[in-house]
């Protein structure tokens, strides 16, 4: 069995399948059927062409076709059907639970695929939750970074949502977008956004710095990277910061979207997050000479 082990490097297990061979067969058939929206297959029993199979029929067909394939071969079929640019590494449920974290209260389901968190090598996220989880973590990292850089006050000045929904293309509301990404924003009685003080910080106890636990966030995210560079490399007292959130956020975001789009979620439904842009003004405490 091509099962993963503790010695595999994090970069070689960016996407993992958790389950046994039976679940791998079902996942490979499902991914293959999804990859071919209207499959053209061949019935080996009757030798009659099966043209324009529906997705469910195509999945049953591929399950029969792949029945004799090895676990390793099934992983190859799954990787090819997902078209994510990297192999899928298989782990059985118990070893996966011993080796990795899957979020508070979440136990990996047999037959599910998970995507490695871009910051924490031992943390895996369900593909349908990936962009939302990272967006909320980015919001928290932004607050922590502002404090570490010596911010005195953060003011949220504008918020724009570019995503539309529904038959008539109604724009997603700012309150909806704020909830998606974990930003705690105040709105007026009509639900309209108002310019506001977002956070205030006390006098810093150290020079502006990027804490070690935020360094990978700063490295991977251009918004946070710009914020950190502008403050640590210059004696800035005020500047503007833009936070952008959208589907595919961070390394692995596009992979997660593809996996979820093939119907291989960990149990939840997949819904893309809105594309939103939030503009802040930052005022900093003066740096020591």
Image (cartoon, rainbow, N blue to C red):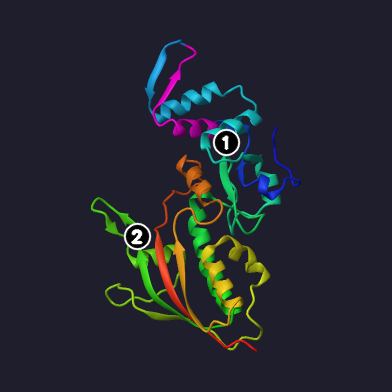
The verdict on residue 35 being magenta is: yes
Residue 99 position in % (x across, y down): 70, 50
Within 10 angstroms of label 1, few (less than 14), some, or many (20 or more) residues?
many
Picture quarter with the C terminus:
bottom right
What residue is at 34 percent from the left and 57 percent from the top?
A: 163
Residue farthest toward the top in the current orientation of the protein? 47
Give the magenta part as a residue range.
26-45
Instruction: Establish if 44 lies above or below 158.
Output: above
Q: Which residue occupies the foreground of this view, 50 or 149?
A: 149
Position of 64 compared to 49: left or right?
A: right
Task: Quadrant for residue 144, please give it.
Answer: bottom right
Q: Which residue is mark 1?
A: 79
287 to 135, vertically: above or below:
below
Q: Residue at x 57, y 77 (%)?
A: 231
Residue 283 at x, y percent in the picture: 50, 83
Q: Nearer the viewer, residue 259 or 278?
A: 278
Q: Is residue 100 visible?
A: yes
Q: Is residue 66 shown above or below 118? A: above
Residue under pointer 2: 162
Checking the image for residue 166, the label placed there is: none
Q: Residue at x 43, y 62 (%)?
A: 180
């Amino acid at each position: 069995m091509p099962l993963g082990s503790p010695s595999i490097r994090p970069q070689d297990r960016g996407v993992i399948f958790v389950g046994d061979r039976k679940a791998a067969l079902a996942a490979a058939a499902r991914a293959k059927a999804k990859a071919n929206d209207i499959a053209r297959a061949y019935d080996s029993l009757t030798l009659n062409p099966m043209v324009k199979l529906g997705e469910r029929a195509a999945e049953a067909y591929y399950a029969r076709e792949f029945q004799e394939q090895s676990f390793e071969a099934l992983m190859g079929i799954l990787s090819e059907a997902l078209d994510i640019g990297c192999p899928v590494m298989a782990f059985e449920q118990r070893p996966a639970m011993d080796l990795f974290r899957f979020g508070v209260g979440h136990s990996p389901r047999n037959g599910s695929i998970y995507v490695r968190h871009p910051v924490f090598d031992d943390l895996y996220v369900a593909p349908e939750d990936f962009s939302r989880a990272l967006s909320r973590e980015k919001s928290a990292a932004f607050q922590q970074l502002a404090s570490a850089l010596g911010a005195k006050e953060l003011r949220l000045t504008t918020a724009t949502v570019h995503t539309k929904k529904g038959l008539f293309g109604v724009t997603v509301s700012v309150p909806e977008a704020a909830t998606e990404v974990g930003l705690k924003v105040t709105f007026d009685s009509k639900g309209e956004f108002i310019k506001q003080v977002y956070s205030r910080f006390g006098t810093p106890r150290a020079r502006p710095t990027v804490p070690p636990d935020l360094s990978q966030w700063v490295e991977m995210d251009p918004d946070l990277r710009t914020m950190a560079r502008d403050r640590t490399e210059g004696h800035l007292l005020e500047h503007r910061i833009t936070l952008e959130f959208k589907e595919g956020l961070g390394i692995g975001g596009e992979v997660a979207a593809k996996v979820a789009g093939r119907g291989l979620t960990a149990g939840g439904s997949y819904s893309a997050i809105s594309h939103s842009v939030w503009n802040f003004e930052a005022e900093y405490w003066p740096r020591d000479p």
